[in-house]
Amino acid sequence: MTTVDFEPLTVSVPIWEEPAGVFRVGKSRVLLELVLAAYLRGESPEGIVRSYRSLTLVDVYAVIGCYLANPTPFKNYLLECEQQSQLIQTQIESGQY
């Protein structure tokens, strides 16, 4: 039986922030919440890349892998996004935006 020694693999998560509090994936301007929402709806990484052509498959897999390894900060971020969205919706409907 042959064994192979693999070097430890370190994968950086391709997420950047701009403006403050808004996270984007890879070298694109695609929002992190859009990628996660698509994944949570059951879309495959390949399907996500087809939907957002500025993303790379490697970046999408890295983000999903990080989410699966530690979902809590991602879930907190998605909750914040949803709360912010609801606040803006309320302001628009009341004519205060």
Image (tube, helix red, strand yellow):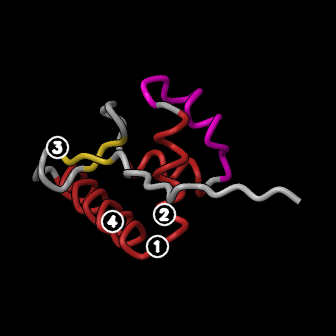
Q: What distance separates the C-alpha of mark 4 from that of mark 2?
A: 11 Å
Where is residue 80? Give x, y as percent. Answer: 29, 67
Q: Reading the chain from its start, which is encountered first: label 4 or label 2? A: 2
Give the foreground label among 3 and 1: 1
Disc 3, disc 4: CB below 8 Å?
no
Instruction: Return the residue at label 1.
Output: 70
Q: Reading the chain from its start, which is encountered first: label 3 or label 1? A: 3
Give the foreground label among 1 and 4: 1
Where is residue 14? Give x, y as percent. Answer: 35, 45
Quick one: label 1, few (<14), some, or many (20+) residues within 10 Å? few
Classify mark 4: helix, strand or loop.
Answer: helix
Disc 2, disc 1: CB below 8 Å?
yes
Instruction: Return the residue at label 4.
Output: 77
Q: Amino acid at mark 4?
A: Tyr
Quick one: label 4, few (<14), some, or many (20+) residues within 10 Å? some
Q: What distance separates the C-alpha of mark 3 from that of mark 2?
A: 20 Å
Q: Reading the chain from its start, which is encountered first: label 1 or label 4? A: 1
**Residue 49 falls inside the magenta stretch:** yes
In percent of the image, x 23 and y 62: which residue is there?
Answer: 87
Instruction: Return the residue at label 3.
Output: 18
Which residue of the protein is positioned furthest toward the top in this rendering? 53
Classify mark 2: helix, strand or loop.
Answer: helix
